[in-house]
Amino acid sequence: MRVERTADGVAMMRALEQHAPRRLFDDPLSPRMISGWPSVIAARRPLRWLFLHALERAGPGLYGAVICRTRAIDDACRAALATGISRVVIVGAGMDTRPYRMPEMAAAEVWEFDLASTQAVKKATLARALDALPANVSYIPLDLTAPDAADVLAGAGAGRTLLICEAVTMYVTGEAVDRVLAYAGGLAAGSRVILTYLPRAEADRSENRRWSRRLGWRSAYHPAEFADRLRAYGLTPLADLGADDHQAQLLRPAGRELAVFPGERIAVAAVKTVGS
């Protein structure tokens, strides 16, 4: 499976969540980010039920993981923007709709980084879904595995920033992850960083080898190990959320019973000092 195609799968799950009676987040744009058979499935209740049932059998907890991750990152974004941050950098933006659906980002300067091929599809999709592409969003091609990736990221500047890197680190090498962390550590004091990562325990679990091969997992970290890497780049860990936290903080309060695949954690950090 090409990694870029995971963005389409995530977009479909977010669209499906809009039909849940106690949905975890509002994303009215997500149904317009999909087309073809995914759009047909999302629009018809019997097909939604069949698809989610089949998905749960094929990948228990994947749907729960995606929708909980989306809501948790939404909450972390709102908390960061409430501190007065007015610049947002999204590394590996995929089909993310936050700059287009969250009022808190409407006044922010947003930089979306992703593979050129993914961005071309996204911009064409947004052109059909919106009256016009928003003037506050810039689209910058980026391949984290390329030698010039650090220079491309640096082009977004180093002011006080909210950096989001969702569902990216597990698909690239540790060297590429370090490029993102190095850029994050050079941001202005008070910047916030939201990254997701693959727990090493799940990467090493024999039951997950099929997903590792299919999705192309390349990097994984123990939570303490990832926190140490954040500190090494001048970042102060603020939170590290996983499946148990999603169950306790999001699903049970909403009266939802869903499995959550524990293969992705959300780390939130702050920049301590400029260039530290």
Image (cartoon, rainbow, N blue to C red):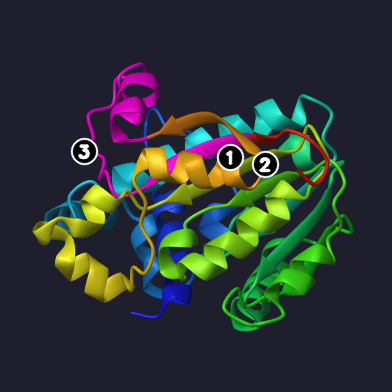
Q: Position of residue 50 (x, y in %)?
A: 19, 56
Identify the secondary structure beneath mark 2. Answer: loop
**Disc 2/disc 3 C-alpha distance (Å):** 35 Å
Identify the secondary structure beneath mark 1. Answer: helix
**Disc 1/disc 2 C-alpha distance (Å):** 5 Å
Whether residues under marks 1 and 2 lie with C-beta atoms below 8 angstroms apart, the answer is yes
Q: Position of residue 178 (x, y in %)?
A: 57, 61
Report the front residue among 110 and 8.
110
Q: Quadrant of residue 141?
A: bottom right
Q: Position of residue 180 (x, y in %)?
A: 63, 59
Q: Is residue 245 above or below residue 179?
A: above
Report the front residue among 85 and 25.
85
Q: Amino acid at mark 3?
A: Ala
**What residue is shown with label 3?**
259
Report the front residue among 30 and 117.
117
Give yes or no for residue 144 being in the magenta stretch: no
Tell me the crowding category of disc 1: few under 14, some 14 to 19, or many 20 or more residues within 10 angstroms, Cα based: some
Whether residues under marks 3 and 1 lie with C-beta atoms below 8 angstroms apart, the answer is no
The label number, if any, that marks residue 234 in the structure image: 2
50 on left or right of 24:
left
The label number, if any, that marks residue 231 in the structure image: 1
Look at the image and give the residue range highlighted in magenta. Answer: 242-269
Tell me the crowding category of disc 2: few under 14, some 14 to 19, or many 20 or more residues within 10 angstroms, Cα based: many
